[in-house]
Image (cartoon, rainbow, N blue to C red):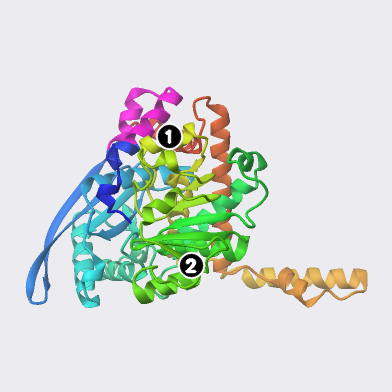
């Protein structure tokens, strides 16, 4: 894939986000003062610190931006990447504010980043760097259960979140809610089942909800359900892999193309997503994957014919230069900001709907919210009521059998009598969240004549809620 900073054309990422917000504000005829408050970043912290690497001190630079504190805590991931900068972190923090509002998660928006290529360091070195970064954030008031709660992002995962959580616990051993300072932790250390896959699962639920509305399917130039639909995914990391895996194994879609850093692999009959991922882990790329055609220019595959295109890697990969050649019927943004402001306008004019990142990839923060609640409540979901519901299910089965003088089949019996565990409840809550949010987006599109696309409608949903809060609390 092209480099993150050279692939983008036109506006910078932050400018692109602000321009989209400006457009939504104009459609809503919102007060100028509220509009400026919405776009301003509340605070930005930059830190530089040394860590000893192979006997020599190495300086690392990172940021934590808080876009809004209209709801607390502020929420957003921490990414480790060699191309992180302040502009990107501020743009992502703003997106988190809108994202949380769209899906009714009561958080403000924040984001963090460290200039770091995780592949260049050993495990113990990464741990030392992560713990030092955490201490910098904690010491300056940018990490706590009540004020600012990070989560994983590009280049980080449960392991890094576990290190950060342990660092906070060591600094505040008397804080009974210390595990709520971080989400996305390992399940064994206060995490919640389903968080690792949450963003990809949320995208699947978003696409499913669109396909429950025949008029929206027709709007995209498609017919029927997801079964057999051709999908191209850019980036088979945590997000891209999970959405591709779920769409193929549970909904019958065909992943006909996978784009990675070294190129892309194509098979019109469909790729085995798990096999492609294993190949990437073993070889570092998709080249030489058996049973597929290799295309060294991965970015060109963004323009290949498909039903659904899911850019789930970097921002700015669909820009004004390639947007006129995109052939997908529907674009689903898995990454943050993969479609630039200029490209978005071109795609609208061409009649290609874009399901926006601020809605589509909100599954991560939604399940992070569940994990945060779980940590504050100090009890896993389902623990209190699971056996009660199992007993109630068995009573219903007995009543049916006595009333009909028949035996309920074993497969149906297990379904009726099953009490929901934490994983079931997390998936149910995420599904409900994504469904209701999409319905709000459709409603906003109907209420505002200028909101002709999903992105503007989604921003309007968010801005209505945030502006109401700003007015109520006197911002």
Find disc 2 in the rendering and name its residue.
Answer: 292
Q: Using the rendered view, name the quadrant where residue 341 is placed.
A: top left
Q: Is residue 332 left or right of residue 226?
A: left
Residue 301 or residue 211, whichever sits in front: 301
**Local secondary structure at mark 1:** helix
Say which quadrant the C terminus sits in: top left
Image point 48% across, 59% down: which residue? 257
Using the numbered discs, state the Cα–Cα distance from disc 1 to disc 2 in whole angstroms.
Answer: 32 Å
Left or right placement of residue 44 versus residue 175 in this view: left
**Residue 418 on image: x %, y %:** 68, 71
> Dominant secondary structure of the magenta stretch?
helix
Mark 1 or 2: in front is 2
Q: In the rendered structure, which disc, 1 or 2, sits on the residue that comes first in sequence?
A: 2
Quadrant location, the N terminus: bottom left
Q: Is residue 459 magenta?
A: no
* Total marks in image: 2
Residue denoted by label 1: 346
Q: Is residue 176 above or below residue 40?
A: below
Q: Position of residue 19 (x, y in %)?
A: 34, 32
Q: Is residue 374 visible?
A: no
How packed mark 1 is, by other alpha carbons closer than 10 Å (few <14, some 14-19, many 20 or more), is: some
The 10 Å Cα crowd at callout 2, few under 14, some 14 to 19, many 20 or more, is: many
In terms of depth relative to the viewer, which is nearer, 89 or 108?
Answer: 89
Q: Which residues are magenta?
A: 18-40
Residue at far right of view: 405
- Regarding mark 2 in the picture, which secondary structure is present there? loop
Can residue 219 be seen in the rendering of this structure? yes
């Amino acid at each position: 894939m092209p480099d993150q900073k050279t692939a983008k054309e036109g506006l910078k990422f932050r400018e692109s986000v602000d321009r989209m917000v400006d457009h939504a504000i104009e459609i809503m005829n919102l007060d100028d003062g509220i509009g400026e408050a919405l776009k301003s970043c509340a605070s930005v912290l930059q830190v530089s610190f040394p860590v000893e690497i192979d006997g020599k001190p190495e300086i690392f630079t990172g940021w934590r931006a808080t876009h809004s504190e209209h709801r607390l805590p502020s929420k957003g991931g921490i990414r480790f990447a060699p191309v992180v900068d302040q502009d990107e972190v501020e743009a992502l923090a703003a997106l988190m504010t809108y994202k949380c509002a769209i899906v009714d998660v009561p958080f403000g928006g924040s984001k963090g980043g460290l200039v770091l290529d995780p592949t260049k360091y050993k495990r113990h070195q990464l741990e030392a760097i992560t713990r030092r970064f955490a201490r910098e954030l904690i010491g300056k008031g940018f990490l706590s259960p009540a004020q600012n709660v990070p989560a994983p992002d590009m280049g980080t995962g449960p392991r890094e979140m576990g290190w950060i959580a342990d660092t906070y616990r060591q600094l505040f051993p008397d804080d009974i809610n210390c595990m709520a300072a971080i989400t996305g932790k390992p399940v064994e250390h206060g995490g919640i089942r389903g968080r690792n896959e949450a963003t990809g699962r949320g995208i699947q639920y978003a696409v499913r909800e669109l396909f429950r509305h025949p008029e929206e399917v027709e709007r995209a130039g498609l017919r029927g359900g997801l079964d057999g639909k051709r999908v191209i995914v850019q980036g088979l990391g945590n997000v891209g892999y999970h959405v591709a895996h779920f769409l193929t194994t549970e909904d019958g879609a065909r992943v006909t193309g996978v784009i990675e850093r070294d190129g892309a692999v194509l098979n019109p009959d469909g790729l085995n997503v798990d096999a492609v991922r294993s190949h990437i882990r073993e070889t570092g790329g998709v080249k030489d994957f058996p049973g597929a055609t290799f295309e060294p220019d991965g970015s060109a595959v963004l323009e290949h014919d498909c039903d659904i295109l899911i850019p789930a890697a970097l921002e700015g990969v669909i820009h004004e230069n390639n947007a006129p050649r995109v052939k997908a019927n529907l674009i689903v943004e898995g990454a943050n900001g993969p479609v630039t402001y200029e490209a978005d306008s071109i795609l609208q004019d061409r009649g290609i709907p874009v399901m926006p990142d601020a809605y589509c990839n909100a599954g991560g923060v939604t399940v992070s919210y569940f994990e945060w609640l779980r940590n504050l409540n100090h009890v896993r979901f389902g623990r209190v009521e699971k056996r009660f519901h199992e007993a109630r299910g068995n009573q219903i089965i007995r009543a049916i059998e006595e009333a009909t003088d028949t035996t309920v089949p074993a497969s149906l019996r297990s379904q009726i009598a099953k009490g929901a565990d934490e994983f079931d409840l997390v998936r149910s809550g995420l599904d409900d969240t994504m469904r209701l949010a999409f319905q709000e987006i459709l409603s906003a599109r109907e209420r505002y004549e200028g909101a002709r696309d999903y992105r503007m409608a989604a921003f309007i949903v968010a801005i209505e809620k945030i502006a109401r809060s700003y007015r109520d609390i006197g911002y």
